[in-house]
Amino acid sequence: MIGVTLKQLRYICALDRHRHFGRAAESCSITQPALSQQIKELEALVGAPLVERGGRAIRMTALGAAFVARAQTILLGVEELSDLVRAAEGPLAGRLRLGIIPTVAPYFLPQVIKALSHDLPGLEVEMREAVTKSLIADLTEGALDLAIVALPISEPSLREYPLFDEDFVLVRPRADADRPVPSPEALQAMRLLLLEEGHCFRDQALSFCEMSGPQPRQVMEGSSLSTLVQMVGAGMGVTLIPEMAVPLETRSTAVAIARFPAPAPRRSIGLVWRRSNPLSDQLQRIGEILRRLGAPRGGGVEPVNARATAS
C-alpha cells in the first residue's frame, strides 16, 4: 500500500474518535468536505471501505477498526521520535499540548500559563479543555503531551505527578446560611445539583453523598460549575464545588458557602503523561514548577458557615 500519508492517518483516527465528520474535521482544523475527500482517497488506496456511512451514526468497518489501531501506534511513534529529538536539544521549548479538565481550567489555568511563561519562556502552550475520558484518550494516542486531571487515573501506561489536594465546599441558598451543615446522609434527601455525566467531579460528589444510583427527582444536572451555583441561587437545590472555584463562582450570586466537618470530601489534582514519552524528565520539571504554585486560593471559606452576597 503506497501513498498513505500521516495526514490521512490523523484524519481517520480523528473520525474514529469523534464518530462524526463535522466534529472530526473541526478537531483537525479543516473543512468537512476536505476531510471526507481525504477519507475517500485513503479508502481508495486501501482498496476497501474503512467507514460505514449509512444511518445516523458513523461506524468503522472491521478493517477500519483494525486500521485505526495500527494508525494510532504509527502516529504515537512519530510523535515520540519528534520528542526524542527535542529531549536531546536541552531545555524544553516549542509546542506543548496541555489538556485540563473543566472544573480546574478557569481557576488554575491563568497561574499555570504565567508560571510556564516565566520559567520556560521558549514553550508555546496549546490548550485543550475536556473531560477526563477524552484527555486520557488523547494522551494515549499522542494527541496531547500531558494533562491536568483529578488523580488517581490508574492507567499503567501513564505517569502520575500530584500537584495539590483541595476540599469540596457546600453551596446552598443564602436563606440556609445559619443552618447546620448537612451530613452525607442528609444530603441524600436534598435536591442535589450535579454536573452532567462524564465529569469526574460528579462522580466524586456522588461518592461523598453515598449515592451510587440517585433518583431523577433527587438530582438535577448542569453543564458547568457556574450554572450549578446560579441554580442554587435561584433556590433549586444545593451543590458541591471545589474550593478553588469559590471566589469566581460565588462573587455575584446570593448563596451561602460552608465547609464540611472532617473527614471532608476532597480531591487530588495532578499531571499525567505517557511513561514512554522521551520528554518525561522535562515534563516532570513542569510538574515541579506547577507544584510550587500550590492550590488556588479558595477565598477563605469559614469552617462552619460563610455568606456570599450578591454584588
Image (spheres, helix red, strand yellow):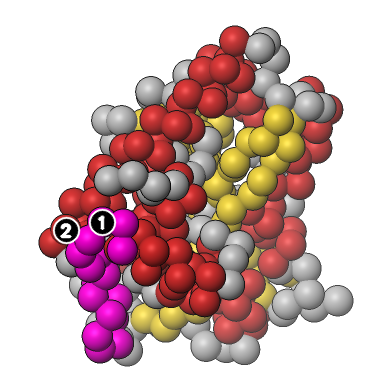
Give yes or no for contact between labels 2 and 1 (Cβ–Cβ under 8 Å): yes
In the rendered picture of this protein, how many numbered marks are placed on residues?
2
- What residue range appears in magenta? 44-59
- Relative height, residue 159 to residue 128 (above, below): above
Position of residue 253 in the picture relative to residue 168 (left or right) = right
Give the residue at x 28% y 52%.
68
**Would you identify the image quadrant in which residue 282 lies?**
top right
Q: Position of residue 184 (x, y in %)?
A: 35, 62
Give the residue at x 27% y 46%.
1
At label 2, the amino acid type is: Leu
- Can residue 203 be seen in the rendering of this structure? no
At label 1, the amino acid type is: Val
Q: Which residue is mark 1?
A: 46
- Relative height, residue 129 to residue 142 (above, below): below
- Can residue 287 be seen in the rendering of this structure? yes
Q: Position of residue 281 (x, y in %)?
A: 53, 15
- How would you classify the magenta stretch by its main secondary structure? loop
Determine the CA span between mark 2 and mark 1.
10 Å
> Closer to the camera, 197 or 193?
197
> Closer to the camera, 139 or 246?
139
Query: Which structural element holds mark 2?
Result: helix
Give the residue at x 29% y 76%.
58
Q: Which residue is mark 2?
A: 63
- Residue 136 on the magenta segment: no
> Closer to the camera, 140 or 245?
140
- Relative height, residue 263 to residue 24 (above, below): above
